[in-house]
Every structure is written in structure tokens, then in C-alpha cells.
Image (cartoon, rainbow, N blue to C red):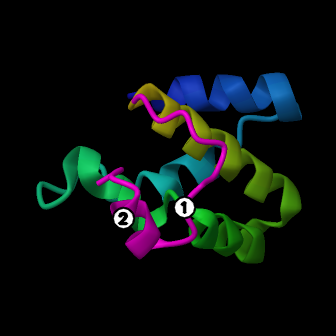
Amino acid sequence: MPALEYHCYECIKELGEPFEYVHKWLDEFMNDPKYKTRHRFLRHHRKGIEEVRKMWGDRAARAAEIHIRKDLESDGWSSIHIPYDEKEFKEQGLW
């Protein structure tokens, strides 16, 4: 799984700034023993991106999308479709 530094680096390359706060928000539940690497279903979807957009704007939403794509790709996911919500995330077998 890509680390915070990797996500920041990818955003610097593409957007010119790290958006560390976005990555921390997306991965907030990563260290919760209840979820661990399965935390992604909570925010790694289109609804999560829209939450970021509401909180921090369009560029932050793009950073969230970059983060989500990199995480899902690291799990072997190859679809260009990001799940809409928690339910679709699980239905696509990403859980």
C-alpha cells in the first residue's frame, strides 16, 4: 500500500502541491484495528471524492481521486471506474 509520502509525491508531480490533509482524511481509519487495510471502503469511492470537494474544493478532490486510483491499483484493481459508494466498493470485490 502506498505510504503518505508517496501519495504526497504523486500529487506534487501532477498538481504542484502535496495535499497531505486529503490523504490523511482518506486514510483516517487505516490504523483502526477494526478496519486496517479494509478501511478503504469507507472513503475510497466517488462519494468520498465529493466529500473532499465539499470540504476543500476541486483541486483537493482531484488529489483524492489520484490517491484512490493509486491505492486500488496497488491492490491489483485495473478498472477505470471508481466505485460510487461503500456498497459498490464491496460489490466490485474490492473489500
Amino acid type at image mark 1:
Pro
Inter-mark Cα distance, 2 to 1: 9 Å
Residue farthest left in this picture: 33
Question: What residue range appears in magenta?
Answer: 76-95
Q: Amino acid at mark 2?
A: Glu
Looking at the image, is mark 2 or mark 1 nearer the viewer? 2
Quadrant in which residue 17 is drawn: top right
Q: Where residue 78 sits: x, y (%)?
A: 54, 33
Q: Is most of the magenta stretch helix, strand or loop?
A: loop
List x then y, in percent, for residue 10.
69, 26
Q: Earlier in the sequence, mark 2 or mark 1?
A: 1
Q: Secondary structure at mark 2?
A: helix
Q: Is residue 35 magenta?
A: no
> Residue 60, image x and y in percent?
77, 55
Residue 54 point in image, percent of width and height: 75, 77
At 74% from the left edge and 32% from the top edge, which residue is drawn?
11
For residue 13, above or below residue 57: above
As drawn, 86 above or below 83: below
Q: Is mark 2 in CB contact (under 8 Å) with mark 1?
A: yes
Residue underneath mark 2:
91
Task: Name the residue beneath numbered marker 1.
Answer: 83
Residue 44 is left or right of residue 30, and the answer is: right
